Every structure is written in structure tokens, then in C-alpha cells.
Image (cartoon, grey):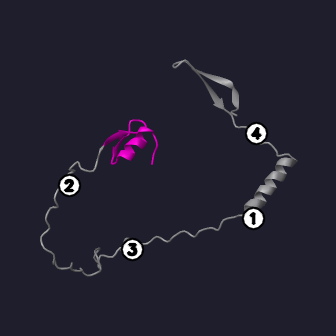
Amino acid sequence: MLVFNYYLEYNYTMQMIHTSLGKSKKRKMNAKQRELQASWEAMLKKYATKKVAPKKEQSLSAVYSLGTPACRETPKIPSLPFTAGPCTKAPDKVYTGTMIKGIGTMHKSNAVPIFSDEQAVDIARMRRG
């Protein structure tokens, strides 16, 4: 909660009211607050973290070396020689129309292929099988 001073300053140029904030007086803690503060400090001591020593600054020449190249250290491994014949394109797969009997409509206009008369009857009765 902000504590406002009772004195208001009026700015004539902007026609706005400004308030100046005063410093609030520090209040003394009661017995309950002192007890809570003591238990808080005891818990902080109990679970205190270890302090980490700051890292020493290193020069760039100690970290990076221009003597070793930044490349692969393993030797180049040759590939196997090509032993197979020339690769030809596989013939296109074209459906001849001998397997499918028709197209059925299942739930929510889902088109399904029908391969047998039994499947057609099942779909017509809305049985799946």
C-alpha cells in the first residue's frame, strides 16, 4: 500500500496533480513476527547452499589453439567399390480392375473398396467384419 504525503503539488502547465511519496517509518515487530523471523533464519541456516568459487578468467590463447586445425581427426574411409549392374526403373504399378468389385460407403461418407459379395452385404447391413 502506498503512503501518500498530505501535501499535493499542483503543476500549472499540465493541469495534473502530483503527489510526493514520503518514507514510511519502520515499525517494530511483535512477538509472533519475531518468532516467525527467527524460525525463518534457522531454516535458511539449515538449508544453506554452498558458495561456488568464481571461475578464473582465462585468456583466449589458453582456450583456443591455432596450432590444431578444427577439422576431422579420423582418416578418410573409402567407400566400397560399385559392383552391381545399372539400376533400371521399375515398371509402373497399374490396377487392372480384376480384384475390386465396387466401392462402398461406410460411416460419415467413408469410401471403402469392396473385394467380395460378403463384404458388400456386411457393409449394406452396417456390420464390420
Q: Nearer the viewer, mark 2 or mark 4?
A: 2
Which of the two labelled residues, at mark 1 and mark 2, occupies the earlier sequence position? 1
Tell me the distance, in whole angstroms, between the alpha carbons under discs 2 and 4: 90 Å
Q: Regarding mark 4 in the picture, which secondary structure is present there?
A: loop
Tell me the distance, in whole angstroms, between the alpha carbons under discs 3 and 1: 39 Å
Tell me the distance, in whole angstroms, between the alpha carbons under discs 2 and 3: 61 Å
Q: Mark 1: which amino acid? A: Lys
Which of the two labelled residues, at mark 3 and mark 1, occupies the earlier sequence position? 1
Q: Nearer the viewer, mark 3 or mark 1?
A: 1
Q: Which residue is mark 4?
A: 25
Q: Which residue is mark 3?
A: 63
The residues colored magenta run: 102-129
Q: Regarding mark 3 in the picture, which secondary structure is present there?
A: helix
Tell me the distance, in whole angstroms, between the alpha carbons under discs 1 and 2: 75 Å
Q: Mark 4: which amino acid? A: Lys
Quick one: quadrant of the N terminus? top right
How packed is label 1: few (under 14 Cα within 10 Å), some, or many (20 or more)?
Answer: few
Picture residue at 32% right of the left edge, 41% below the top:
103
Mark 2 near mark 3, Cβ–Cβ under 8 Å? Answer: no
Which of the two labelled residues, at mark 4 and mark 3, occupies the earlier sequence position? 4
Q: Which residue is mark 2?
A: 93
Q: Which residue is mark 1?
A: 46
Horizontally, residue 92 falls left or right of residue 52, namely: left
Q: Regarding mark 1 in the picture, which secondary structure is present there?
A: helix
How packed is label 2: few (under 14 Cα within 10 Å), some, or many (20 or more)?
Answer: few
